[in-house]
Image (spheres, helix red, strand yellow):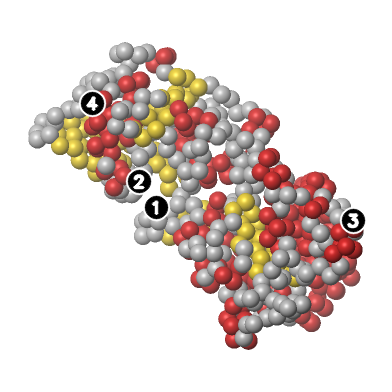
Amino acid sequence: MFSVIQGASVYGVDGKSISVEVDISSGLPQISIVGLPDPAVRESVERVRAALKNSGFTFPLDRITVNLAPADLRKEGTAFDLAIAAGILTASGQINDAPFERTLLIGELSLNGSVRPVPGVLAMIEQAKRSGIERILLPSGNVKEAVWISGMELYALNHLNELDLNKKKQADWTHIRVPLGNMSAYGSTNSPLSVAALESIGDYGDVIGQHQAKRAMLIAAAGKQNILLSGPPGTGKTMMIRRLPGILPPLTEQEALEVTKIYSVAGKLLDGSQGLIAQAPFRAPHHTISTGGLIGGGSIPKPGEVTLAHRGVLFLDELPEFPRQVLEVLRQPLEDRIVTISRSKAVFQFPADIMLAASYNPCPCGYYGYEYGDKHCTCSASLISRYRSKISGPLLDRIDLQLQVPRPISLEQQASSPTLTTQQMKELVLQARSFRLARTTEKNSIQTAGDPTTGAALRKAISLKPEALHLLDHAFEVLGISMRAYDRILKLARTIADLETSESVEAEHVAEAIQFRGLDQIIH
């Protein structure tokens, strides 16, 4: 007696179709799972055994072999439980296998037969649709994310005994028909930062002074440029970066699907929330994070913080406190916008289109160069040098905006000066991005911090005025900046021009962009 049920797994952030083959033959009662299963898959034997018994079925007292094909790919997780149980039931003749043709079964089983939700459902269903699968049987707890893949028949299961079509017709399965709605349907109900959370992080209008830093935040949000703030403790570096999500525009529909799929794979959608992730993610890992935690890892690699921040912001507070080897792994993602992890049998790629925001103190005690009152630097020259050496030249080269955030001198004067609110800054960001979209649509090119366009092609694409080019070439000779920094200054100047709705990049735009490279010479 033989049966094949369609299952699925996740590799990287993509789904993979897995055939669950079950053979029952005479022999000593035992069950074997082959096809490179991990411990969680091998342990499914006991879960399936108890679930079948407690759901009114009979577990066959024969030799059972379960093969997960293709057999050369390592399988992990609990998403195969439902498919294995269905395979045993159909192979033993307890239920008919006809309803499971062109059907994907996903779900973890509890000992009493309940079907529990699993991570990665969005990626699995997306792959199933490409493979020609028509129906999906999945836990009811995963339905809210699954409905966003249109054109599929979804059947929500709560218990294993719902598979018994002798007692229950297929039409009686809980059929979910929810078409992909408009963007207002998903809103920010499942966002890492909901509307309430955005209000709780505060308003830029409450920040006293620091007009240049807020200007840098505005430019960074408009062009998705990386930003680094330096200054003594208490000047508002962290506070301003944490307000950054409030001025970022909502994700497009395609971006929302990408981000939601990543969070589904990472198992961060199993909280009963609903809808797509509409707001750009904001991730702020602790400085004790490992290399694998930052870029992803494992025998079958899982997304790290860089991928979880895809289409959003990765905030590294107190940058030199992170181990140098951890920071150095950011160099490739910041340049290529992807993370590539190689294993002996496969190469995994994770999306990493992030905006890096970081802050740091000028020295371990925080007051080097900013002494005032009884605050004096107590760090030795060697300690300061060792502290700053955590930020390598190649990494700093990839950060577009670098500026110092000093302590406000006159608190009363700074508080009385006009300042932009979060809402005003967001409107400017939306205006700049709309202007850039209209401009680049006409020229069929897009210039952002992550655009691979460089050199002469870049200068031609951004409409650089001759006097602006002369100023930038002069800065290249005098300041000794690298060619990478040269190109990033160009893109930064283009973003500044977009904020002013200027078709061409003028000399003043380049001059402002150059002044935001102030830490290149200070750190190194």
Q: CA distance from mark 1 to mark 2?
A: 8 Å
In this image, 123 relative to 194: left or right?
Answer: left
Q: Secondary structure at mark 2?
A: loop
Q: Which mark is residue 76?
A: 2
Q: Position of residue 166 (x, y in %)?
A: 30, 13
CB contact under 8 Å: marks 4 and 1: no
Label 2 packing within 10 angstroms: few (<14), some (14-19), many (20+):
some
For marks 4 and 3 on the same chain, the one whose residue lies earlier in the sequence: 4
For marks 4 and 1 on the same chain, the one whose residue lies earlier in the sequence: 4
Q: Position of residue 465 (x, y in %)?
A: 87, 65
CB contact under 8 Å: marks 3 and 2: no
Q: CA distance from mark 3 to mark 2?
A: 57 Å
Q: Position of residue 298 (x, y in %)?
A: 40, 56
Q: Residue sitting at 48 percent across and 63 percent down?
A: 291
Q: Quadrant of residue 148?
A: top right
Q: Secondary structure at mark 4?
A: helix
Give amino acid for label 2.
Glu
In this image, 361 relative to 493: left or right?
Answer: left
Q: Secondary structure at mark 3?
A: loop
- Residue assigned mark 3: 418
Q: Residue sitting at 59 percent across and 53 percent down?
A: 283
CB contact under 8 Å: marks 1 and 2: yes
Label 1 packing within 10 angstroms: few (<14), some (14-19), many (20+):
some
Give amino acid for label 1.
Ile
Q: CA distance from mark 4 to mark 1?
A: 32 Å
Residue 451 visible within the image? no
Q: CA distance from mark 1 to mark 3?
A: 53 Å
Q: Nearer the viewer, mark 2 or mark 4?
A: 4
- Residue assigned mark 1: 300
For marks 2 and 4 on the same chain, the one whose residue lies earlier in the sequence: 4
For marks 1 and 2 on the same chain, the one whose residue lies earlier in the sequence: 2
